[in-house]
Structure formats: structure tokens, C-alpha cells
Image (cartoon, rainbow, N blue to C red):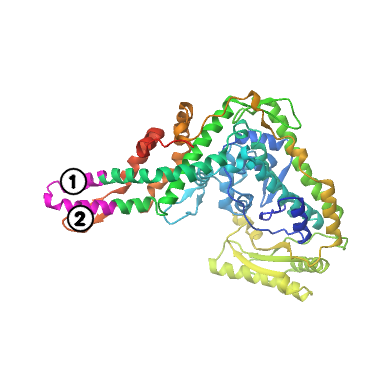
Amino acid sequence: GHRVPPHTAGPRGIAALQALVGNRVTSAVMSGSRPPAQVQRFAGPEHATLGDSVGATIDLGSGVVLTWGQMVAIAGDEYGSVDEVIADSRTPQGRAKLRAALEHDEVPGTLAATLPPTSTLMPPRGEHEPRQTAMEAQKKRYEELVVDNIPHFAAGGTAIATWTGHHQDALARALDAGLADDPGARQLALATEAFGEHFLTDSFSGGHVRTPRAEILDWYMHVFGPRVVIPLVDELRRRLTAEFAQQIAAQLPHLVSGAAGPIGEMVTRSVEDTMTMLAPEGVVLLGQFIGKYIAGAVSGTLHDMEGSRGVWVNSVAHPAPWLAYGDGRLDDSPDSASEAEAAVAAAKAQVDQAYAIGLRFRRTVATPYAPPRTIHFAFGRHDLDATGAAACQDAADFLRARPDATLDLVGHTDQVGTDSANDALGSRRAETVKGALVAAGVDAARITTASRGESEPVSEDPRQYRLNRRVEFGWGSRPVSEPSREREEALAALALEIPDFRPVLDRVPRAFDALNVELEDWHWGSMPQNIRDGFNTWMSVHIRPVLLPMLADKALKPIVITTPPLTGVTLEPRPVAKRQVEKLFENPVAYLNDAFGTPAGP
């Protein structure tokens, strides 16, 4: 298969796309990232069904081939960016995490069983975090993403804007891939498009059409949070003080009354230390933190309610209103399914068209073969055999024919030997290939070398270690001072043949408010009972798994007081914090109202 290079942020319009492609040649190795996305959407199998309606696959390399629907499903819900998916496909631990994502989203297909088990241990993410299995790590990633789900909602245009950004990136990459006739770069374009189509298909889910996720988050973080944070901190300080005083009294029941001053001083100091541990960034950011999580629960409640009762919608392409439902109810809304499938097909067709345009205008310089991708070596050796030497000659011919092309050489080894020895051997192998290319007349400045040692094996099977002893060719490009005639013509054709995204956007539903009930008030002081009840449920299901791991943080370790007359007294912040969290999730609305009152709505 063809390895997909990392994804990078791209243009935001046809004109910007023209400027981007007109000043760069196709690159099979790109880097960058997107802001993280999130959940609240059609269920994974529903996303997969919509995506798989186009009947396409995406080859990530290393034997990892996703169906189009699998990429659509795990995007946003299980992964924050297409970069994460591609990176995970390249290492054994990452592939275990990818399997966990596919299984957690209930879209394993036939691929999951070929990947490492989800019990594979992952490296710790921080000094305070224990090692986790791939499935545990993936579930935690899922719950983290559940709090930042703005890109998934249609209200305010965020879902479509997110898809549009990915679509423009995909068009640019597809055109570049065609101009270079580069199958690997084409896979990047396809991966980028399929990832973005998660947000496109989210727009057809009833819970996403009217829920004003961005507006809710903004109000709770910047209006509500600052209103409640001071009374909340004061109330927490009062509760912690009372609990710590009880801990001291239990350890020193016969303490003389004259020690009341030192007791109060130590309790106060310990409470302030604990408050600092709980909110190290300060009160202002604590208010935003509180607002963010409450906003997530309020938005989720509205989303679930709208998805359950259905929202009347229509579109430019389908002016007759239909009832759109949410998670798990795609089968109850056949119009949503058919319109979403038509939008997915139209979006992919534009990416395929961009690739075809690139092929039509690609350079006419004779390059009768694709450049090499890998050279293998004998055990412990870094010299070239006849096959490797021939591959180097092919690469040199390609570089001479393509003055814009660049090459990143990465040396690899098998798992025999020490890390340092393998790093050095991988470097020697990459330098050997570079030396052969320079000797053949290639400018050394166009070639970089690196070593990954044994860290990125193709196979863990000792019988297949020969596959790991290799140098991989990463083909890229460097900017050219003037765009080529072929590129200028390709850009002109792209703008003419794909002037806009109307074939897709005309399918996207919008609320048909004449038939819909009025959306509930989502401001804290004005929420009706059904929103408050839904809020409690949503907090327990989605926010609780995010907050509970914080109770294991080493910052909540016992505090030993060494000041007389309290020498030897130990305060335990962790059980205190645990009790408060448990009380919070017994009835979140009641707990929060008790802590900071019932602030007015807008």
C-alpha cells in the first residue's frame, strides 16, 4: 500500500487553494495539525454506513487499509485530527490504539482483528498517570473529546465550516498528487476528505441542526463562569475547612483549647494549598473550566433531546420538509440517509475530479517509473547490494528529472541489538543511500537523513525482521520561484470545473422552524425541568469519567503538618475531594445551586 503522509492545515477557498498549489509542488510528507474535534453525533455504525455508500478505501500504509466509512466514523469521535490516525497506523502501539478506536466506535470491520490487541500497554502520557492499555487510553481520549465538540454542530455553521476546511485541503492535495502522479499523496487527499466528512454527516443528525453549541460554550465560559466562580470557591473553602478540622480533631482528641489558633492557621494553610492544587491556573481560569464542562453537559442535553424528538428540516436540493432524528435513529429518517449519502458522494467526486485534473496537466518530463520507496539491507550491514544500488540510480534519475523534488531518507533496523547501536546503524544506512545519490549528481541540499533505529518496525515477527532493515524514501517538494505552466493551467481548470461546493452544500439540512417546537432556554437560571434532568444524566454519563481520574493525581497526596503543637498530624485531601465529587454526581444541579446559588439567566 501507499503510506499516507501527515496532514497539514490547508487553504480556505478556491483562490487560497490556487495560491497554495501554485507555489508548492506535491509533497508526500506534510506535517501540521488541526484543533481537536469531538463527539455528539450519529452513532459510529451510522457514520460508517453513510461513508461506505461510496464504496472506497483508504490505504494508510503498514498494511492498514480503512474503509471510507471507518475513517468517517472515527474522525472527531475517536481522533482529534487526521494526523493522529496516520501516526497511529505507523507503530505497533498506535495500531493497537487504532484497533481500540474501531472497536469502541463499533466499526471494526475485518481490519481490527489484524491489528495488535487492545490490551497492548501504551506509554504513560505524564508523570502522574499510570500506564494504560490501548482500549483504556482510547476511552479516555473519547471522553476528553466529548467536552470540545463545537466542530460537530450545524448551528452557527461550525460543522460545515470544519468540513469545508478539510475539503479544501483535500482538493489541494488531490491536485498536487495528480500533478506528480503520486499514489501516496492521493491517499492523503482521500484520508483528509473522509475525515472531514464526519462533520458533514453530523449536519444531517437532528441533534446538531439547532443546538447552538458555540453560543452555549461562549456564554458559560465568559458570562456564567465569572459569575459563579467566587461563591463556588468560597463554598469549597468552607467545606474543606470543616473536613480538615474533623481530621485534626480525630487525630488529636485531647488537644488543649489554647491550640485553637495553630489549628485554625494550619487548616487555613492546608485548605489554601489544596485549593491551589485543585485550581493551579487561578480563579479566572477555574471559572472558564467550570463553564466549559457545564456548557458541554447543557449542549449534550439539548442535542440528545432534539435527536430523540426529531427536528423538521429541508434543504435547497430537498425543499419538502422531513423529520431528522439523531443518534441511533438514522433508519427512522430515510430522507436524512439518502441526502447525506448524496452529499458524501458529491464531496468525494470533487476530490477525485481534482486528482484527475492534476493528472491531465502533470509534467511531461519523462519519468517512466515511480520513484523507489524502500531499500532493504542485510543483517548488521549498511552497504548497498545490487538491488539497492539500482534503486538509488532510479531515485537519482527521478530527482534529476524533477528539480523541485526533495527526499527525506529514514534509516531503520530490526530489533536485535541495543537502542544506541541500532540508532547509529539506521543513520549509516540513510547516509549510504544519500552518498550514492550525491555521487550520481544529485545536490546534497535536496536530501535529508534521519534514523528511527528499531522504533518503527514493519513486523514484530522475528521471521520477518528482514523487512525492518531498511531505508524509507519520503518524497516531498521545495517551493519553486515561478509556478510551472502545467500548474497554472491545472489551477485554472480546477477553478473552472469546481467553482464552488454547491453540489454538497445544497444537500445540507436547515431547520424548518414553522413545524418545530421552540428550543428550550439553556441559560442556567432559566432552564426548564426537562433540561435540568437531562443535565444530571449527561453529567453522570459523560463528565464523570473525565473528572474521576483527577482524583488519582499525586498532587492530592497526604499533607503532614510539622508545626507544634500539631506535629505529626496528617491531612488527607484525596478523600475530601472524592466526597465532594461523589456529592456532585448524586445531583449535579442541586449541588451546584447549593454551592453558588441560582444565578440569573442572560
Q: Residue at x 71, y 70 (%)?
A: 447
C-alpha separation, residue under disc 1 versus residue under disc 2: 13 Å
Between disc 1 and disc 2, whose residue precedes? Answer: 1
Q: Would you say the magenta stretch is mainly helix, strand or loop?
A: helix
Q: Is mark 2 on a helix, strand or loop?
A: loop
Residue highlighted by disc 2? 568
Of the pair 122 and 295, the residue shown nearer to us: 295
Q: Which residue is drawn at 38% across and 50% down?
A: 278
* Residues drawn in magenta: 242-270
| 315 in relation to 402, above or below | above
Residue highlighted by disc 1? 249
The amino acid on which the numbered mark 1 sits, given as a three-letter code, is: Ala
Are there few (<14), some (14-19), or many (20+) residues within 10 Å of tag 1? some
Q: What element carries label 1?
A: helix
The amino acid on which the numbered mark 2 sits, given as a three-letter code, is: Gly
Q: In this view, does 249 lie to the left or right of 437?
A: left
